[in-house]
Image (spheres, grey):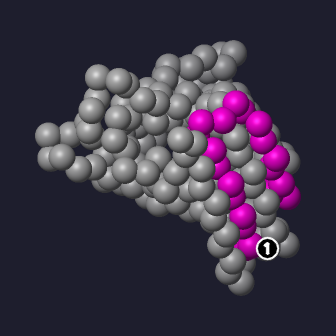
């Protein structure tokens, strides 16, 4: 059973379509109008082995905020819907990931309670046409719309490109672990019987 979700979200600020296959092979088609953001989403798909199609038309004449935040909202919704009833999945995932001089830790829980925390402080204000403060806004939006507890620790800082790329790749690997199946888990991984 493939876990696939397609979502379309249209507002006065953005028009977004997302197709996510959690059981893919890392294929992607990404068009957001923001080159560096495309690069980050491509890395997320490839390193998480998710098949991902994202097409965004946003109000980039204003700035990059709505495009990136709204993409996070829709991707989070797609993750939540694609994972389904969560029966048999590991639920938790973590990854300690080096990216040249940078070392980043990502840990997450698909337990249904949204929370986001990160200690990443970027040395530059922009990477290409993407404001570095939007890394936080993107992951915050993903975590809340996916009902995911998501933490990042920047154990070794470095240049902004490497920090952001390390975060996206670590998130991909942690999510891949969390959504993977374990045959020892016969229902959901919770004493409540539901997550």
Residue 21, horizontal then vertical, whole percent: 63, 44
At a point 31% along the width and 46% down the height, the residue shown is 111
Membership of 103 in magenta stretch: no
Image-quadrant location for residue 100 = top right
The reply, left or right, for residue 37 in relation to residue 89 is right
At a point 80% along the width and 49% down the height, the residue shown is 30
The reply, left or right, for residue 35 in relation to residue 52 is right
Query: Is 12 located above or below residue 137 in the figure?
Result: below
Q: Which residues are magenta?
A: 14-34
At a point 71% along the width and 46% down the height, the residue shown is 52
Image-quadrant location for residue 114 = bottom left
The residue singled out by tag 1 in the image is 59
Residue 19 seen in this snapshot: yes
Residue 56, horizontal then vertical, whole percent: 78, 63
User: Total of numbered circles in the picture?
Assistant: 1
At a point 28% along the width and 29% down the height, the residue shown is 185
The residue positioned farthest toward the front in the image shown: 1
């Amino acid at each position: 059973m493939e876990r696939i979700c397609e979502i379309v979200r249209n507002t006065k600020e953005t028009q977004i379509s997302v197709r996510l296959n959690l059981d893919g092979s890392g294929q992607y088609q990404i068009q957001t109008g923001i080159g560096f953001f495309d690069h980050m989403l491509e890395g997320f798909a490839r390193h998480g082995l998710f098949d991902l199609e994202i097409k965004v038309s946003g109000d980039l004449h204003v700035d990059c905020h709505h495009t990136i935040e709204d993409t996070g909202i829709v991707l989070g919704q797609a993750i939540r819907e694609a994972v389904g009833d969560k029966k048999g999945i590991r639920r938790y995932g973590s990854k300690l990931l080096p990216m040249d001089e940078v070392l980043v830790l990502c840990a997450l829980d698909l337990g249904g309670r949204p929370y986001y925390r990160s200690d990443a402080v970027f040395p530059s204000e922009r990477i290409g046409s993407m404001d570095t403060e939007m890394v936080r806004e993107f992951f915050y939006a993903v975590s809340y719309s996916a009902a995911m507890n998501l933490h990042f620790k920047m154990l070794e800082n470095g240049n902004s490109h490497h920090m952001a790329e390390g975060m996206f790749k670590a998130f991909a690997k942690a999510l891949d672990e969390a959504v993977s199946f374990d045959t020892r888990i016969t229902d959901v991984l919770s004493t409540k019987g539901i997550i």
